[in-house]
Image (tube, grey):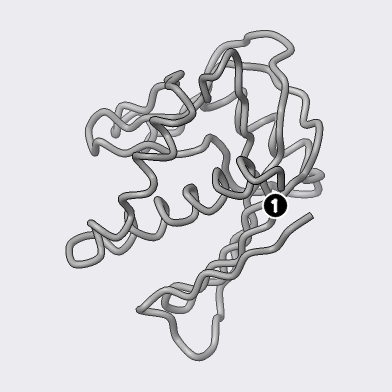
């Protein structure tokens, strides 16, 4: 398994806050499952924060079900990304997942506000979208960082981990 380090332009010397998340990469017939925020025009690999005593795999399954409505089985953890922004240390664990079924989505208030919806798009289109991360450097550091993270993840996946 590979680990990638991303140091944000706005990082502090010391990180005092940590967030651990799990993200699931699901590919079917050349298309990847992403979440799309209609109201902010942003794509993401689905996933989110670890809760309580759940395992990384349990977090991945729960987050994908909540955000996309798909029940998945994590098959392989292929990547961990460490990101440093301001006082935050973000850890994202990426899993290749297989769809096992469907369920009802359970969106947070914020996810409802941004119009979060699952979208299947060609893998190459997703790589192209995330490859433009640097275009947001001057205007939106959060989007730039998220797109860089997702680009790194898909590049690693495409290289065979």
- Within 10 Å of the Cα at label 1, are there few (<14), some (14-19), or many (20+) other Cα atoms? many
Residue in the foreground of this view, choosing between 101 and 136: 136
Residue found at x 30% / y 64%: 141
Horizontal side, residue 62 vs residue 155: left or right:
right
Q: Residue furthest bottom?
A: 13
Horizontal side, residue 75 vs residue 120: left or right:
right
Residue found at x 63% / y 9%: 102
Residue 51 percent across, percent down from the top left: 69, 47
Q: Quadrant of residue 138?
A: bottom left
Residue found at x 24% / y 38%: 40
Q: Quadrant of residue 11?
A: bottom left
Residue found at x 71% / y 48%: 161
Q: Secondary structure at mark 1?
A: strand
The residue indicated by pointer 1 is 79
Q: Residue furthest left?
A: 139
Residue 15 percent across, percent down from the top left: 55, 81
Q: Quadrant of residue 23?
A: top right
24 w.r.t. 21: above or below: above
Residue 39 percent across, percent down from the top left: 22, 32
């Amino acid at each position: 398994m590979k680990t990638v380090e991303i140091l944000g332009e706005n990082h502090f010397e010391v990180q005092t806050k940590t967030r651990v998340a799990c993200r699931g990469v699901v590919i079917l017939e050349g298309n990847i499952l992403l979440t799309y925020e209609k109201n902010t025009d942003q794509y993401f690999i689905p996933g989110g924060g670890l809760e309580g005593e759940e395992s990384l795999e349990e977090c991945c399954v729960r987050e994908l079900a909540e955000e996309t409505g798909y029940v998945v089985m994590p098959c392989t953890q292929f990547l961990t990304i460490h990101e440093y922004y301001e006082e935050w240390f973000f850890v994202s664990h990426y899993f290749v997942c297989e769809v096992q079924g469907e369920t009802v989505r359970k969106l947070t208030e914020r996810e409802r506000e941004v119009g979060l919806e699952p979208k299947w798009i060609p893998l190459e289109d997703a790589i192209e979208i995330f490859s433009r991360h640097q275009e947001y450097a001057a205007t939106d550091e959060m989007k730039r960082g998220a797109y860089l993270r997702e680009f790194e993840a898909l590049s690693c996946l495409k290289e065979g981990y």
